[in-house]
Image (cartoon, grey):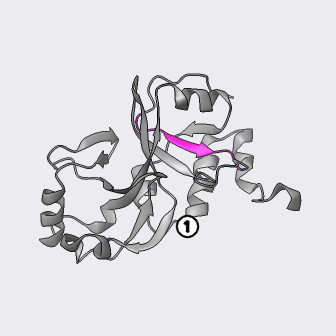
Amino acid sequence: MPNRVKKIKYMKGKVLISEPFLADPNFSRSVILITEHNATGSFGFVLNQKTNILANTMVEELHLVTQAVYNGGPVDLQSFHCLHTYDHIQDAVHVCKNVYWGGNFEQVFQELKQGLMDPKNIKFFIGYSGWGPHQLDDELTENAWHVGNLESQDIFDSSIDDQDLWKLAIRNLGGQVSLLANSPVDPNLN
């Protein structure tokens, strides 16, 4: 399969799409955007684990933002992060086309408050997904993940249900792999 290789040198901006029957409950049917991948490890955010927590209940400065926060992964659940489409945010890290990670949070808060940024173009996360050196490469070798791409509009579209985002990401891979989108959650029910 062309999207599954032992080592992928350039992972930043790619999405990891979990195998349909991945046993780890933290990553069951997950889609993870990789924001950093280098010799020290890999870092990213689960895009399809919406919580019941609203951004305005977590951060006082976000009182106008009523969208849900996502569980970015099982690491450091006290941390708060964001992905957005704004290239002018100071210290924001370019991840892929029209997607930026973090930056100056005070600037983000102020521009949201002033209506200069549309909350629909921002996704907030508690926690993140992280891998040590070569750990992600090992998981790829074990076929735990498919590697693909998502358009920025799909990353930020809150109308796409969590499971539907996983299905969309699998279908985007094409070929026989795309048939996995129809697999049942419990293979014993097939």
Count of all numbered marks drawn on residues in the image: 1
Foreground: 171 or 145?
145
Q: Quadrant of the N terminus?
A: top right
Answer left or right for 122 relative to 158. Answer: left
Q: Quadrant of residue 78?
A: bottom left
Task: Give x and y (percent) for residue 116.
Answer: 15, 65
Can you see residue 55? yes
Q: Which residues are magenta?
A: 12-20
Q: Relative to residue 48, is residue 6 drawn left or right?
A: right
Vertical placement of residue 43 versus 49, above or below: above
**Which residue corresponds to mark 1?**
161
Magenta stretch: includes residue 55: no
The amino acid on which the numbered mark 1 sits, given as a three-letter code, is Asp
The quadrant in which residue 168 appears is bottom right
Q: Position of residue 141 (x, y in %)?
A: 64, 26
Residue 60: x and y in percent read 21, 73
Q: Give the residue drawn at x 61%, y 22%.
A: 6
Q: Residue at x 14, y 46 (%)?
A: 90
